Image (cartoon, coloured by chain):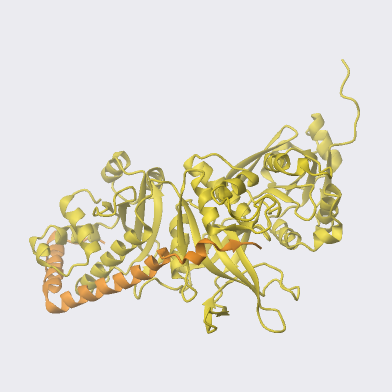
Chain colours: A yellow, B orange
Amino acid sequence: MEGPTPQARTFDVYPYSLDTLLQLISGLSPLNSKEAIAAKAHSVYLDGYLREIRANTIVVEKEYIDKDYLEDFAAYYVKCFRDYPKTCSRLHFFEVEFNVDDFESLLAGSTARLKAQQLQQSYCGFVVIKPLPQTIIGRTCLRTYSSSSSRSYPVARKFRSHLFGIHLTIDETLPFQEQDNVVAACATSALWSVFQATALEFQHALMTPVEITRAATDHFPAETRMIPNRSGLSTAMMAHAIRSVDLEPVLLSLRADEDATLRANVYAYLSGRIPLLMGVRLYDLSMPKGQEFLGHHAVAIVGYNLNANAVGSQAAPDFQLKAGRIDKLYAHDDQIGPFARMAFDGLTVQLENPDGSIATSQSLSTSWPASDGSTTKVRAVPTMLLVPLYHKIRIRYEDAFESVCDFDGFLATIRHVVGETVVPRLEWDIRITDVNGLKQDIAIGGTITQAARLRWLTSSMPRFMWRATAATGQARVFDLLFDATDIHTSDGVHAMLCYDPTVEALLRTIATNPVLSGITDLPNGARKVLGWLGANPSAAA
Amino acid sequence: MTMQESELKKLAEQALKHLSSDKGKKELREAADKSREATESIRRARYIDPEHLNQRFTV
């Protein structure tokens, strides 16, 4: 039996460099010159990113069928007079250094020069190259920067890819792609990345960019033409796209004069593995005549950095919220790249109000290129957050926040009497969690007795809870759990889980003392928590 | 840190006595006010300017 007919090689291997990357992309996407690709912000960003994750070798998969592009192609490009290809190319990046002969030997069955295991262990991820003019970055899965105690990408997940029969795994990533300006705008790309995470978390169908744009605009028949999409999506359209996958959009508007709300909500949802969409206004500060408004832009927030030494803005005086220590956000910004840094660096911009007055606004750094070529002078002013929630997450963040803040106030009052050695000053970590995440955490990290561990792990709990962990330094003192599936008129406290026996015993003694019922000035949240402790005197630890 | 039950009981009684006192009540009211104010600041994010809904993200 004859083997396959000899043909041009369907792959190539190159050592990594920016010049090689640009040359390859322009060769694979011939409607773009190398210079045009070099001028894109993605090129500079990806080069820095790939160097950081130690990409040393590129394997080019010359023909790759990408589902997202294929859907976009079927919906639009195939009907163009010009003959756009239906296949893409894919660039794979590896830390290990090898050449085309090593790789060819491996594929032919010899492992003397290169082993599949070496590829698997050093895989950095891939970038799909689309055969379109200007907008070329397709589905991109690159591993995150090496983890640290401060940097966190809660929605990143394990991702598998296959290269000529070799199974490859990226331990931690979330797919990214650039808008094509035809079937997708920036908001579409941000939604697409967000759905990559929520589809897994809440089991909904994955949508391609063209499907997202259609779902977003289905209910707006009087709007201007949506495909080709030259005018972007509105907030309401993005909310409709979220509804189309059976999730509930929660819209939060952000004020220019404070950023505590942004940090608190990003932390609360993202650490519960729910990504957020953030709308920003972009300003270029490099213009000779002052700042220039570039437009409204949407990104997907997929990570954050907690600065242990930061004194971040706090939601209330003397109320220490862990979220206040967020000093950087990581965003899938379709005009820049995956996991792009946006820092709370204290710089402000001047905004003109509708009445002509000038207001100073907090802003975030971006990696956008400014008109003078620098990448530090385009600022983002956050205007809104859009959170895609599973329908059973009903109780709002601020309801849990208020109860926690009330209880913290009660603890501060008794701290004056019993001392900080008994009731220490606390930092609060408020986040959404599901029952499995909570139980897994109790199973691996709790400092509770065996009996308590057994009781908590086997007890029935709501699927979603607001979890407020009170800690002093690295030591957890207790968790307050609020049933997030409840009705808002209920007292909401599901349980209190104590790690510190002294605090637990003191609070239980107070909660069961009849004198407590006569203290009418007790903040409502404190009454709820103490009420639960009084009704469950032995269940906290 | 663990404490004797009698010590804890004494501390709990002192705490309750403070909470029942005028000073303690005042502190509790101030704590509730601070909490309300902080929550209201976060809750304000729910008030959506209709203009926001139609804002197009275009760049």
Q: Is residue A45 visible?
A: yes
Image quarter of residue B22: bottom left
Q: Is residue A174 visible?
A: no
Image spot of residue A388 (x, y percent): 48, 51
Most extreme residue toward the front is A222
**Residue at 28% across, 40% down:** A459
Most extreme residue toward the top is A1
**Residue at 53% across, 43% down:** A199
Give the tally of numbered discs: 0
In the image, residue A395 sits, relative to residue A78, either above or below, namely below
Image quarter of residue A452: top left
In the image, residue A50 sits, relative to residue A59, either above or below, namely below
Image spot of residue A374 (x, y percent): 73, 73
Image quarter of residue A59: top right
In the image, residue A61 sits, relative to residue B24, either above or below, namely above
Image spot of residue A162 (x, y percent): 70, 36
The answer to whether residue A540 is left or right of residue A7 is: left
